[in-house]
Amino acid sequence: MGVGIEVTNLNAWYGTNHTLQDINLNIPANHATALIGPSGCGKSTFVRCLNRMHETNPIARVTGSVRIGDLDIYEGAKPVQIRRRVGMVFQRPNPFPTMSIYDNVASGLKLNGYSNKRVLDEIVEKSLKNSALWEEVKDDLKKKSGASLSGGQQQRLCIARALAVDPEVLLMDEPASALDPVSTSKIEDLIFQLKSQYTIVIVTHNMQQAARVAEKTGFFLNGRLVEFDSTHKIFTNPSDKRTEDYITGRFG
Amino acid sequence: MTRIRFQKSLDELKENLLVMAGLAEQAIQRAIEAYRVRDLSICDLVSRSENAINRLERDIDQAALDLLAMEQPMAIDLRFILSVIKINADLERVGDAAKSISDRVRNMEQMATADLPVDIPRMATLSAEMVRKSLQAFIEADAEIARSVLTMDDAVDAMNRAAYKALTLVMEEQSHIAPQALNALMICRALERVADHATNIAEDVIFWVQAEDVRHSKSVAKQAEAKAASQNSQA
Amino acid sequence: MSVETFKFKSRMRAVTDNAVTLLAILATVIVVAPLIAIFAYLLYKGASSLNLAFFTQIPKPVGESGGGMANAIVGSGVLLAIASAIGVPIGIGGGIFLAEFGRGTKLANAVRFTADVLNGVPSIVMGMAIYVLIVKPQNSIIPFSGHFSAFSGGVALGIMMIPTVCRTTEEMLLMVPHAVREAALGLGVPNWRSVLSITVKTASPGIITGCMLAFARVAGETAPLIFTALGNAFWSASLNTPIAALPLQIYVYALSPYDDWHRLAWAGSLVLIVLIVLAVSLVRYVTSRGVLKGAS
């Protein structure tokens, strides 16, 4: 089951660059929340603050608090532990090139010490079914490498890999932007089904996609959260003029 | 500024709708004038503008459909295009009502003049005013003007009900002028429909500008009435 | 541009194209030709002396014909095994440190600099250094010290392998796309685990090539062995005593005044090259079978 995310006064810096300013929002559990905004507005940085991935950059710094469920992820928890509860799918599909499909899906578990073959088999099958890839690969699990699949399949493989460690939250950073429309539709349908089990946060450039999959949408601009409301409201009658300008495509 | 082409398309759509609105308004004015002076040549004018109105209705709907499919409009743009489509339909029906009135006038030409207990000119003026105001609200994107139109509908409805009562009485008691009474009743019906369409147009303007769906809501009209009343008492 | 000008320019372009292609082929031939010439000459000179005895017998005393270089072949094998055991782990470990854990630190820069310097040390100087450090001291804590030994020869060769392995490993690791590391980190895998199980594994074909390069280089080294392994006319497979080595044996025999030994030297050179090529190919084959069929 998913959990809610409570962000309070989040500020983030890369070196001297104040990338995120005073972000406050509550992401509801078991819903899909979309984050939209122009390039460089901070939405990707924000999402990476939710699983402390931004820390992989040595000049990154964060103040404020992020509570995932009952856990404050910046106090008293290690990044590695957080990332097992908060999974991430990236913009470009990145399956491990030297591993088979099976090993890719199981990698999160194997690399963290699980080795019971029967349990792994079950989890791999369940994850691939949850990511709508099982039927297409079930005969080639150990024979084909992760990199031999098509782009859309690779991304679903990455989703399966993230789901295999049974996170509570799934972060998706523009998961379909490198994919064709058919694959995109499949991924969107997937998100719809996954909502009931996980809390999903999806960063997207594609407003129509946000409108299709998310119940709530947040609009970021220049490091600030300008508006956060139901998707219906944002796309039919946003409260802030900046939001409306962005949504109707009027820039400059 | 980005999406210049799209903005131009939206402006064009508004222009075309206003052209149609002008034709519809003119048709009503002419129909009422034809009734007043019983001039059949004016009835001919009304019939001809009917074709233009129908053609425009198709063109505007097509243009709106294209914009929806090609430009993925959002928020205010989306509400605008939806309103245009609806107002388009209402204007076409206003044109139909005008034709209906002019047909009645033609019909009555064969008959003797009769003194009927209805003030059709007054009802006509009120309905025409509602159409004018609702179109003004659209041109200026002014929700307040639109809301004031909503309050006027009750008066027209009341006049229509009174006309119905009076004219059915005439038909029962003075059967020699029943045809005239019937025609007059149908003209009142047409005018009442015009008022309803004007109300619809006003509601669509409010939806576009304020994102509020005020259809079938008595309270809105009452609110606007109360506001107008308080403003009058202050003036 | 008129039609005539266009046609002329097209023809000129085609001519230039062909001329450059010809030059490229010529350059390739010039480079490859000596290689082929050497190998052909070795075959010519050495093949006739190859027989079973060559691979099974130790050298016969001067004056007696026959004999072989079996002890040198085995000796080279022992020396290269020791060298690999030293050079590969230290080299790969150094490469991992430089690429993954020490990026940008002063220590990493120092390590890289040291590796480059080590690379430039002449092989004979390396031999002399190991002589002073291991062969000469009598009461040292280093094992097998105080005399010429296979161990000291292996150490000398091993140290020479380190820079190549280290730098290649570093470069191959840096070529692993950032996305792959991010994927591992995103799963909550600790950094060290991600480096070892994912990054290193992804770069392993390149790392193995680096090891092969280093191996091939030291397999033919003679000078460092003069001061360390010394060479041995008899069978020896112990770490504690001087040991024969193919390059060393070839050197001694080639400079000798005996025709028999000259013939053995030619045969030995041929065998040395063939063995190196075989060793590299074997490693390639074994490791490539473990790699899955996948997209290029």
Image: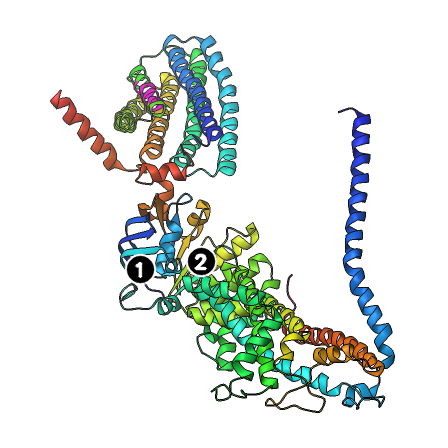
Mark 1 sits on what residue?
A: A5
**Residue depicted at 43% across the width and 33% down the height:** B81
Circle 1: element type: strand
Closer to the chain start, of discs 2 and 1, is 1
Between C296 and C249, the one lying in front of the other is C249
* Magenta highlight range: B126-136
Q: Position of residue C44 (x, y in %)?
A: 87, 73
**Residue depicted at 52% across the width and 77% down the height:** A121
Between C100 and A197, the one lying in front of the other is C100
Q: Position of residue C68 (x, y in %)?
A: 79, 86
A140 left or right of B65 in image: right
Q: Chain of mark 1?
A: A
Whether discs 2 and 1 lie on one chain: the answer is yes
Between A157 and C159, the one lying in front of the other is C159
Query: On the rendered image, what quadrant is the N terminus of chain A found in?
Result: bottom left
Residue type for callout 1: Ile
Toward which corner of the image does residue B231 lie, by quadrant?
top left
Q: Position of residue C289 (x, y in %)?
A: 67, 74
Asked if the magenta segment contains residue C136, the reply would be no
Residue type for callout 2: Phe
Between label 2 and label 1, give the one nearer the viewer. Answer: 1
C257 left or right of A86 in image: right
Q: Crowding near pointer 2: few (<14 within 10 Å), some, many (20+)? A: some
Q: CA distance from mark 2 to mark 1?
A: 19 Å
**Residue depicted at 44% across the width and 61% down the height:** C103
Mark 2 sits on what residue?
A: A192
In the rendered image, the residue lying farthest to the left is B234
In the rendered image, the residue lying farthest to the front is C257
Q: Crowding near pointer 1: few (<14 within 10 Å), some, many (20+)? A: many
Say if C269 sits above or below B213 in the image. Answer: below
Between A214 and A38, the one lying in front of the other is A38
Q: Judge whether residue B226 can be spotted in this image.
A: yes
